Image (tube, coloured by chain):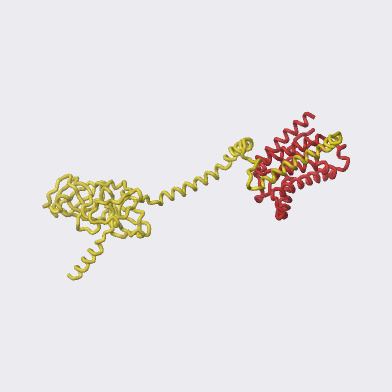
Chain colours: A red, B yellow
Amino acid sequence: MNSTLLVNILRFILLLAVQIVIFNNMTFLGFIMPLPYMLFIILYPVNSNKSGLLFSSFLLGIIMDLFCNSGGIHATACVILAYYRPYLFKFAFGVSYEYQTIKLNEALTPERFSFILLAVVIHHFTMFILEAFQVSFILDILIRTLLSTVFTIISCIIIIYLIKPNKR
Amino acid sequence: MQQIFNFLFKNSNRLLFLLLLCVSLLLTIQSHSYHKSRVISSANFLTGGVYEKINNVTEYLNLKTENDALALENARLKSIIFNTKDTTTIKKPENLKGVAPEDIVVSKVIHNSYNTLENFLTLNSGSKEGVKADMGVINSLGIVGIIDRTSPNYSTVISILNLKSRINAKVKKSNHFGSLSWNGKSTGFVQLVDVPRLASIRKGDTIVTGGQSVIFPENINIGTIDKYYYEEETNYYVIDVKLFNDMTNLGHVYIIKSKDRDEVSNLEKTSKKDE
């Protein structure tokens, strides 16, 4: 438990650092930005403290907002993703997910991929809606969500399967 | 009461979620209104410090483009400096007799040759400022030459250090005329020839421009007599004149427009026709 906490804190800091230093400067076509920092929420241990996840997600988002000058859009998206994460698990891995040992940082199965995909889409869609903050931009929001999702998933998978943060 | 606590414990996650959602939404909404300053911004100690560190690193990656930009900027500024005629700092000479201040063009030597036998200067004033061929060029110390050709913005000057140059000059105190030319030997000396032997001259006498020329006004300094000797065949003096000007070091010059020149030359033409 203690080592999990330590690993998560380390992951929190490292992902934020990588996001701010590297990925915030990587913009494709001027508006598509991969956001692999949300990997923290995806990789958070399945059965551990839910309020802890909510709170740390909020902290993660608010720090991103600090660096991006974006008010609270990252925080909102992160909190929403953290709250709906159990439902995504249920959808991707079946009802009895709590009794399985789900490890996301292993071979890419369809279940894991669908989970990551849904998580990224929810996060990005929320974020871009709040960023635009107008219904008339809905087409723009959808395009941004789609393209950014592709790039975020690519960067997430690269980070998961090349670096393998913790091999327990 | 017990039920309320039960409810709170049961739904603690949901309540925490709602609380955090409210806070973050509030921040989002606040950031979208222009009138309020943002609570969450990158202008604070933490983010500012981190961004400064990042910038320290990325600065190095951009050094090349930064250098290119600076080089471009330098080139632009230099072109401004080189193309500016700083005429505001140069006053027109006012003590020239018979020349109105508006007939003087202040100009700058942008090219100066003095190491060949036929030397020319280039000035950065041209026909746009009314410079025409055969105008006199002087500076504060003495004469420099005569305008040869002009373009809209530039003009060339036949330097007095040119074998072709012939300028009317005289000994200041005795008014004996001669013709000023150059023998091509030294940049500091020119020769005044055709001074009649009658003239009483001494070493150190001042040579000035003569009134016969319509190019220069009378009494503009040229130099002092350094040495003189007779030419046996012609019985005329040849005088070595030490120039007041250092012809190898010229900055600003004045171009003199002579009003009388056309009048005089027309008059001379008509009188020649009559002969």
Q: Is residue B102 left or right of residue A119?
A: left
The quadrant holding residue A19 is top right
> Which quadrant, please, contains the C terminus of chain A?
top right
Q: Farthest bottom residue?
A: B274
Along the line of sight, the residue nearer the viewer: A23 or B203: A23
> Which quadrant, please, contains the N terminus of chain A?
top right
Along the line of sight, the residue nearer the viewer: A126 or B17: B17
Residue drawn 78% across the image and 28% down it: A2
Q: Measuring from the top left, give residue B149's x and y in whole percent.
A: 33, 59
Residue drawn 61% across the image and 39% down it: B43
Q: Measuring from the top left, give residue B68's x and y in whole percent.
A: 52, 46
Q: Farthest front residue?
A: B1
User: Taking B256 as reference, is A41 above or below it?
Assistant: above
The quadrant holding residue B131 is bottom left
Q: Is residue B17 visible?
A: yes
Residue drawn 76% across the image and 40% down it: B19
Q: Measuring from the top left, give residue A74's x and y in whole percent.
A: 71, 43
Q: Is residue B166 visible?
A: no
Along the line of sight, the residue nearer the viewer: A150 or B248: A150
Q: Is residue B142 left or right of residue A142?
A: left
Q: Measuring from the top left, give residue B248's x and y in whole percent.
A: 31, 46
Q: Is residue B48 left or right of residue A44?
A: left
